[in-house]
Amino acid sequence: MRYERDAVKKTFNFFERNRRLITGGFLLVGLPLILFIQHSWPEGGTIDRAFDYSGIALILAGLGGRAWSTMYIGGRKNSQLVQDGPYSMCRNPLYFFSFIGGLGASIVLENLVVIILYLAVFSLYYPLVIKSEEKRLELLFGSAFTAYKEKVPAFLPNPFGFHSGEKAPAKPRLMAKTLLDGTMFLLFIPLAYFIERLQASGILHACLRIP
């Protein structure tokens, strides 16, 4: 049993340590794609506005959802099995809302290659992270987590299962940290605008135009 606990903890710590490294690697690979691949639809047109508005909406939804999830889980992750609020709809709302925010950031860049790359990286990496974390929770909370797992989906929320439970013990410091971490998503909005201006002015020459 102790060996199993140590193995689960080691795997979980590996993913925790390397999550930012994976994110940094994605940005490093994605940057040349952002700079030198340009879309072919006109600036200010219907398609352009659809990308802008939907991307910004998803970023804001991701930020709000992450803050909401932190209100419930903050400071209780290892001491209590949280099953209220967003955790009543899915077992991993922080990852779900991070996905939503990241998708919004990819969409606001209006680069189909970056969107596909983001979806591929997330779908390959984060299921492993979720599986590792849930093994740890199963060891911590035993049958209570097994029962929770049977009635609440892992990733895609089920809104019909929502219940708010008791008042969420919001912790200002954790909330502030979550919002600060989420500003990375917001930075993609001015970045996308700046790159569009550089490409439109001819300072950046696209190597490939996507239909």
Image: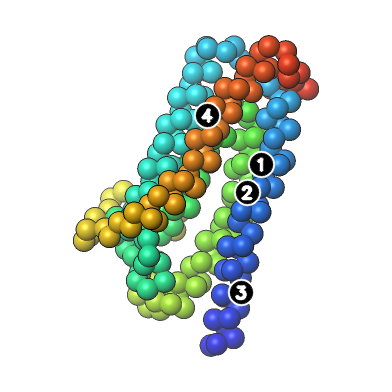
Tell me which label, 3 or 4, sits earlier in the chain: 3
| Secondary structure under the numbered disc 2 in the rendered image | helix
Q: Contact (CB < 8 A) between labels 2 and 3?
A: no
Q: CA distance from mark 4 to mark 2?
A: 18 Å
C-beta proximity under 8 Å, tags 2 and 1: yes
Residue type at numbered disc 4: Ile
* Label 4 or label 1, whichever comes before in sequence order: 1
Residue 198 screen position, x and y as percent? 67, 18
- Element type where label 4 sits in the image: helix
Depth-wise, is mark 3 or mark 4 nearer the camera? 4
For residue 139, above or below residue 29: below
Query: Type of residue at label 3?
Result: Lys
Q: How is the image coloured?
A: rainbow
Q: Which is more N-terminal, label 2 or label 4?
A: 2
Q: How far apart are the two marked residues, 3 and 1, measured between alpha carbons?
A: 26 Å
Q: Which residue is mark 1?
A: 27
Task: State the image coordinates of residue 109 (x, y, percent, origin top left).
Answer: 59, 28
Q: Is residue 114 left or right of residue 166?
A: right
At numbered mark 1, what does the secondary structure look like: helix, strand or loop?
helix
In this rendering, would 76 be left or right of 32?
left
The residue depicted at 34 percent of the width and 50 percent of the height is 68
Distance (Cα) linking label 2 and label 1: 6 Å
The mark found on residue 189 in the picture is: 4
What residue sits 57% from the left and 22% below the top? 193
Can you identify the residue that label 3 sits on? 10
| Residue 176 in the image, given as x and y percentages of width and height | 40, 50
Q: Which residue is at a point 57% across and 68% down the rendered structure image? A: 12
Rendered image: mark on residue 23: 2
Name of the residue lying farthest toward the right:
207
